[in-house]
Amino acid sequence: MIAVFKREFAAYFVTPLGYAFIGVYLLCSGAFFYMFTLTSGTASVGSVDVSVMFTLMFFVLMVTVPVLTMRLLSEEKKNKTDQLTLTAPLSLFGLVMGKFAAAFSIFLISTAVMPIYGLILARFSPEHFRWAVIWGNVLGLIMLGAVYVSVGLFVSSLTENQMIAAIVSILLNIAFLLSSVAAAYVKTGFVSYALTEISLLDRYTEFTVGIFRFSNMLFFISLTAIFIFLTVRMLERKRWN
């Protein structure tokens, strides 16, 4: 697992992909922070200003994380090196977790900028500042990123075309986004309830407004684990075929 992690992590900086993702992340988060927090009047942490910034990051990550993960497994399949990987003396779970950890680490490096915004707010608006709100939003962002990385990793195991992997991942993320909208048009009570419960945006938004529910944390962790499990199962199927 460690060897896979080191190889995949280094690969992000051999190509422009890692730099591009971090750059887009910092550009968007910085712009949102300036427009919706520093210039929002009171710059009051915990108000709608911070909520808007973190909510907009939801939509940015919905599109950018699939680009970060699109090459993880599809590239090996395209280059016909996947058979060497699958037959190597390495557990498939270790292989998947190594690749997941590499992409997720790039995401965490980008997210490390968020506490810096907190320091800026603590300097310019100490009377309204609460670190608990910043850390709560960062926690929600990290768990959201874990879900998106696991979804992208799973889709990458299905195709050798990186562009298709990115597009399908984005579509899946949009499906999770629109599930609550679809629930309003479904007449069946159980189906409507289920669609509402799997809405990533609804659960993530609660973090941005300072609401912490253990059920939301468990949902993000469980969804990440499910897609990692599905990726392992997909590779097991390829190994035996």
Image (tube, rainbow, N blue to C red):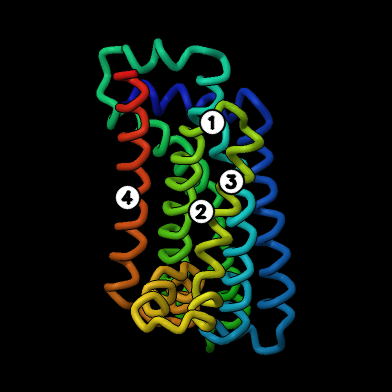
| Foreground tag (2 vs 4) | 4
Label 4 environment density (alpha carbons within 10 Å; few <14, some 14–19, many ≥20): some
Q: Is residue 64 left or right of residue 207?
A: right
Q: How much space separates mark 2 and mark 4, taking CA atoms?
A: 26 Å
Residue occupied by mark 1 = 159
Question: Is disc 1 in contact with disc 3, using a CB cutoff of under 8 Å?
Answer: yes
Disc 1 secondary structure class: loop
Q: Secondary structure at mark 4?
A: helix
Which residue is at the front of the view, 231 or 27?
A: 231
Query: To which residue does mark 2 refer?
Result: 112
Mark nearest the camera among 4 and 1 is: 1
In the drawing, what numbered circle is on residue 24?
Answer: none
Residue 142 x/y as whole percent: 44, 57
115 vs 99, left or right, is: right
Residue at the image position 49 percent from the left and 40 percent from the top = 155
- Mark before the other along the chain sequence, 1 or 3: 1
Amino acid type, label 2: Ala
Q: Position of residue 5 (x, y in %)?
A: 40, 28
Between discs 3 and 2, the one toward the N terminus: 2
Labels 4 & 3 near each other (Cβ < 8 A): no
Callout 3 amino acid? Val
Q: Is residue 8 above or below residue 154?
A: above
Q: Earlier in the sequence, mark 2 or mark 4?
A: 2
Marks 1 and 3 sit apart, C-alpha to C-alpha, by 10 Å
Q: Nearer the viewer, residue 90 or 48?
A: 90
Residue 168 image label: 3
